């Protein structure tokens, strides 16, 4: 009797993992026109130039984005989206739904980064504050708030001398102190 229960448990476990991986592999739908609507909102509210090409949008599980880059949209303490400027790829973290305004705001945040590719910032980190500000404003227009640690955003997005002049000789920093 015990071997039958173990075999049944093993089979059920295998089915569970197979089903879980199939569901996890599915990507949510982004409704036709949503990206255009978000770009129109960015056009109205900012002076960011249009992107020279469409961003590629992919979905990933939270475990796949455990190490967010500087260009990560972090809501609460969890990364919800990433942008790779080298490939022009937006990664949205599942679960993601176009019916959830917070999720759509993450997509907006990453679209802002895509449009920032052609603009000058003193350092890469400075792009993050602007994207969070736009995300906050978009949510505010819908009567919602953005749950981020603003002190952390400000600190992380400020440009230190090492970010602006990474090859500046150390001797110059002593001249400034004297």
Image (cartoon, helix red, strand yellow):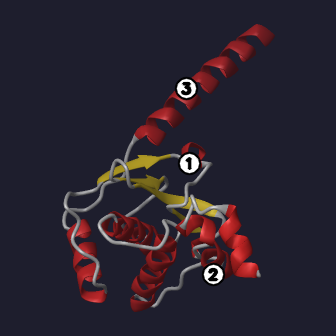
Q: Residue at x 51, y 77 (%)?
A: 129
Q: Residue at x 41, y 62 (%)?
A: 97
Secondary element at image label 3: helix
Secondary element at image label 1: helix
Picture quarter with the N terminus: top right
Residue 10 can be seen in this image? yes
- List the residue tagged with mark 1: 65
Q: Residue at x 42, y 81 (%)?
A: 134
- List the residue tagged with mark 2: 150
Q: Nearer the viewer, mark 2 or mark 3?
A: 2
State the separation of the CA atoms marked 2 and 3: 44 Å
**58 is higher (above) or lower (below) than 166:** above
Q: Residues within 10 Å of mark 3 (few under 14, many from 20)?
A: few
Secondary element at image label 2: helix
Looking at the image, tell me whether mark 2 or mark 3 is earlier in sequence order.
3
Report the disc number at residue 163.
none
- List the residue tagged with mark 3: 15
The reply to whether dot 2 and dot 3 touch (C-beta < 8 Å) is no
**178 is higher (above) or lower (below) than 74:** below
State the separation of the CA atoms marked 2 and 1: 22 Å
Q: Residue at x 53, y 36 (%)?
A: 20
Picture quarter with the C terminus: bottom right
Residue nearer the viewer, 112 or 175: 175
- From the viewer's perspective, tell me whether residue 28 is left or right of residue 177: left
Q: Quadrant location of residue 51?
A: bottom left
Q: Position of residue 126 (x, y in %)?
A: 50, 73
Q: Position of residue 88 (x, y in %)?
A: 33, 53
Looking at the image, tell me whether mark 1 or mark 3 is earlier in sequence order.
3
**72 is higher (above) or lower (below) than 66:** below
């Amino acid at each position: 009797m015990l071997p039958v229960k173990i075999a049944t448990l093993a089979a059920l476990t295998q089915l569970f993992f197979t089903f879980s991986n199939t569901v996890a592999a599915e990507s949510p739908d982004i409704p036709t026109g949503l990206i255009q609507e978000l770009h129109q909102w960015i056009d109205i509210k900012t002076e960011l130039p249009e992107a020279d090409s469409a961003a590629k949008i992919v979905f990933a599980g939270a475990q796949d984005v455990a190490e967010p880059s500087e260009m990560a949209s972090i809501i609460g303490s969890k990364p919800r989206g990433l942008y790779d400027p080298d490939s022009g790829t937006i990664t949205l973290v599942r679960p993601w739904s176009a019916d959830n305004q917070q999720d759509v705001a993450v997509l907006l945040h990453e679209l802002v980064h895509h449009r920032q590719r052609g603009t000058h910032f003193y350092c890469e980190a400075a792009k993050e504050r602007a994207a969070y500000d736009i995300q906050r404003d978009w949510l505010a227009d819908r009567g919602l708030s953005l749950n981020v640690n603003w002190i952390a955003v400000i600190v992380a997005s400020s440009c230190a001398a090492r970010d602006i002049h990474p090859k500046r000789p150390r001797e110059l920093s002593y001249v400034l102190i004297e």
